[in-house]
Structure formats: C-alpha cells, structure tokens
Amino acid sequence: MTNKIIKGILVLSLVSVAFAADDVVSAVHGFVQKVDSGAHILVVKTADGTNRTFHFVGETTVQGAKDSWHGITKGTEVVTHYTTRGTEDTAVEVDRVGKDGLKATKGTITSIDRGGKTLAVKGADGTEKTFDLTDHAAADAGKEMAEGTEKGAKVTVYYAEESGRKVAHFFEKV
C-alpha cells in the first residue's frame, strides 16, 4: 500500500513539473501577417522569415493598442510573449512597437542585473540609458533568445516610459 502511494506521489510530481515547464514565457519580435479574431489567431513573421502562429485567449493583453486588438493589423511591428503547450503557442502579451507603442533604442550593454531587473545601455551618441526590466524581459534575458546579451553586447531595447521611468519589455542582440 505504501509503495502505491509513493508511486502516485512521484507520478503527480512529474506531471506538475511538466506543466510548470510548459508555462515558461518566451518572446519573439516581428511583423503581423494576419489577425483572425474569429479563430483567435495571430501570425507574426520573424526576422529570419519564419511565420509563427499564436493563439490568443481572453487573458492575452495587448500593449500600445486601443480596444484590445484594434490597431493591430497586417504589417504592425510587435513583440509577442507566449507560452507553449504541446505544439500550440499561446500569446500572453503582445506589445506594439512604434507609434502609440514601445519605443526602440540601440546601443551597447554597459551593465545588466537580471536579479535586480535593470539594464544599462550606451548609445552611439555616448549617452547611457538605464532601464527597469519587466518580469518577462528579465526572464527572457536568461534564455537562449538572449544568448550573447551580456556586457559589451550590441542590442536593441524595446521600452515604454512609465511613471517617469524607462521600462524595457524586450531586448535582443543586434
């Protein structure tokens, strides 16, 4: 009897670990190819030419757009934060880049503190900007998508100005 209970606990533990791994948020930057609000699908073309399909749900947030998906159309530049369950990618957050959305700046990382959620970047003009990192940006920074984004790396930072602070939602190696 004890052996069955131990096996049951072990199976439940492994299942919970598998589900927790599925909830990891990743991000991709690109241009919208299609929004199908009826099918709840967003297709984003990345820099390498790959079309990525994301499902959106009631909890999906859209930054830089009015009335949820209003303004997000074919050609809109976005950063899509998503989770993967099996073969399905679900958009957690979609950040519009450009007018009424995130701003972008390029520079060289002078310091990065993933734990303290801060990033400092020196621009081509020699000025240094310090950014607070969102939870997504801090987590993304520890993944392969941010591989090579340590001190001295050239990056593009996508940020918003919130309450007088520059808040980086995403950054990628240039």
Image (spheres, rainbow, N blue to C red):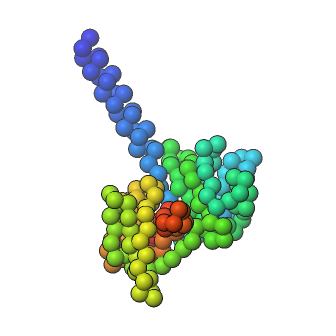
Foreground residue, 155 or 99?
A: 99
Depicted 100 relative to depicted 26: above or below:
below
Q: Is residue 123 above or below residue 118?
A: below
Q: How many marks?
A: 0
Which residue sits at x=36%, y=27%? 12
In the image, residue 157 lies at what x, y percent? Answer: 48, 71
From the top left corner, tell me how far across and down residue 40 is, in percent: 68, 47
x then y, percent, for residue 54: 60, 53
Residue name at image x 41 percent, y 79 percent: 128
**View extreme (top): residue:** 1
List x then y, in percent, for residue 95: 59, 60
- Quadrant showing the N terminus: top left
Quadrant where the C terminus lies?
Answer: bottom left
Asked if residue 41 lies left or right of residue 102, the reply is right
140 is higher (above) or lower (below) than 111: above
Closer-to-camera residue (123/57): 123
The answer to whether any part of residue 31 appears in the image is: no
Rendered residue at 63%/71% (across/down) = 98
Left or right side of 30 for 172: left
Q: Residue at x 53, y 52 (%)?
A: 82
Residue furthest front as drawn: 164
Is 7 placed above or below 165 here? above
Which of the 4 image quadrants contains residue 19? top left
- Furthest toward the bottom, the residue is 125
Q: Which quarter of the picture shows residue 70?
A: bottom right
Q: Residue 1, can we see it? A: yes
Determine whether, in the image, residue 107 is placed left or right of residue 48: left
